[in-house]
Amino acid sequence: MHFQEWLRSLRPSAGLKGSDSEDFWSLLPSFPRSSLSLSQSSLLGLGALASLTAYWLVTRPRPMRPPYPSCRRSALLKDDTLLEFYYDDTRTAFDMFQRGVRIAGDGPCLGFRKPGQPYEWISYSEWIISELACYTYSMAVVPLYDTLGLEAMVHILNLAEISLVICDREEKATELLENKETGVTPKLSCLVLFNEFSDAFVERAKNCEVEVLKLEQLMDLGRQNLKDPVPPQPQDLAVVCFTSGTTGKPKGAMITHGNIASNTSSVIKILEGSFVIRQEDVSISYLPLAHMFERMIQVSMFCHGARVGFYQGDISLLMDDIKTLKPTFFPVILGSVTSPLRRALLHYAVRRKQAELSSGVVRNNSLWDRLVFNRIQANLGGNLRFALTASAPISPAVLSFLRATMGCLIFEGYGQTECTAGCTSCRRSLALCQGEAGGHP
């Protein structure tokens, strides 16, 4: 088929009629037939090229744009009314967990593992111990930090008038018992341990009028003395979280259930449209559970029926835990590249990914992800969708590098215990929002 004849065959779809059509086609130059004749294979090639182009236009990655301009107050709010809850049925920490129970049923909730073993999971219907058990009966929880030192621990125990302490192993409980023996924590009367303990420890505790129980024993006592739940109200106290403080002794931040619900709802609202927590999502927990930041992460996961897996307690084994758990959310960790050739390739690939980021495109399925970044992403479990960096502002160069190599959303946040963890979060302008440690409310 000659070129002119092929073009004329397109006349019905050109939208030209009558003299206009004739004038248009008469303008076509008369090229030599030998130079413009197209074979059937050439036409098939042109068709394939056109099809690929159309497919790319339809499936190409779309940029993610922030829904609001730069501002010093959240434009996500419709008016001056502050967001108290995102879901109508989640106004307390207790409500949020119950919502997760309705979503997940007997699905996995909390995971743990032994060295070299896969993760074992406790279902939502089984998890009725410690903190969540206290919330069920409107009891307040006071976390204890062993890293604050002996003096701070004694101060917290006495100020909060704590009589029962739950801890994991005998070594930590021994420190509490020593305080009781010296008379500095007179209110302490019961210790509950997760792990096994010696008979000598029980006898020592008995001598200073302190009862020692295994967690299983405490749960058995509950089964034998069942009481109807007393669900908390939003204004009820949930946690008294003591901060390290810059001066003097630690100060207790009094956090209500309404504070927790509002803070978690704000996170869900900020992520709206770019990241939705799903039931199949998994978070790895390796931050101190006494910190509000880690607690808020867990409440957010519970609210959506998602899972939380704990690391083994040894930070040197954290990367092995990550590979086994394959989390979709967790704080950022990366290794290093030593080969000069691989480093040069990595830098070039990072620049190409950063070019996409500058236009708002975030993905992990590009050519560079497959060729260069797949090993980094595999070391992080291969399923990462969202990461959060908090505390001090992260270097813009480091943040841009992480976003390029990890191929997921990375938010910067800023918060404090007194504000129930999060205060502000960097807006979703991705490549433009760097080094702000939260930036905008």
Image: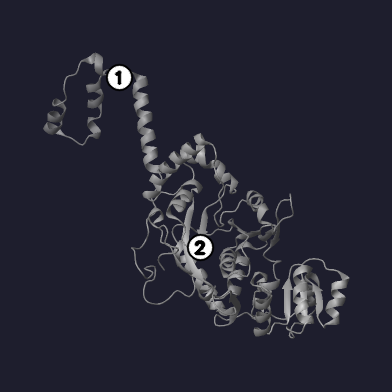
Find disc 1 in the rendering and name its residue. 38
Q: Nearer the viewer, residue 166 or 38?
A: 166
Tally of numbered discs:
2
Of labels 1 and 2, earlier in sequence is 1
Which SS class for mark 2? loop
Q: Quadrant of the C terminus?
A: bottom left
In the displayed structure image, the side of residue 216 where residue 266 appears, left or right:
left
Q: Quadrant of the N terminus?
A: top left
Q: Residue at x 23, y 15 (%)?
A: 33
* C-beta proximity under 8 Å, tags 1 and 2: no
Residue 390 circle label: 2
- The three-letter amino acid code for the residue at tag 1 is Leu
Q: Is residue 162 visible?
A: yes
Quadrant of the image occupied by residue 287:
bottom right
- The three-letter amino acid code for the residue at tag 2 is Ala
Q: Nearer the viewer, residue 179 or 80?
A: 179
Residue 388 circle label: none
**Residue count near mark 1 (Cα–Cα under 10 Å), binned few <14, some 14–19, many ≥20:** some
Which SS class for mark 1? loop
- Residue 201 location in percent, x, y? 84, 73
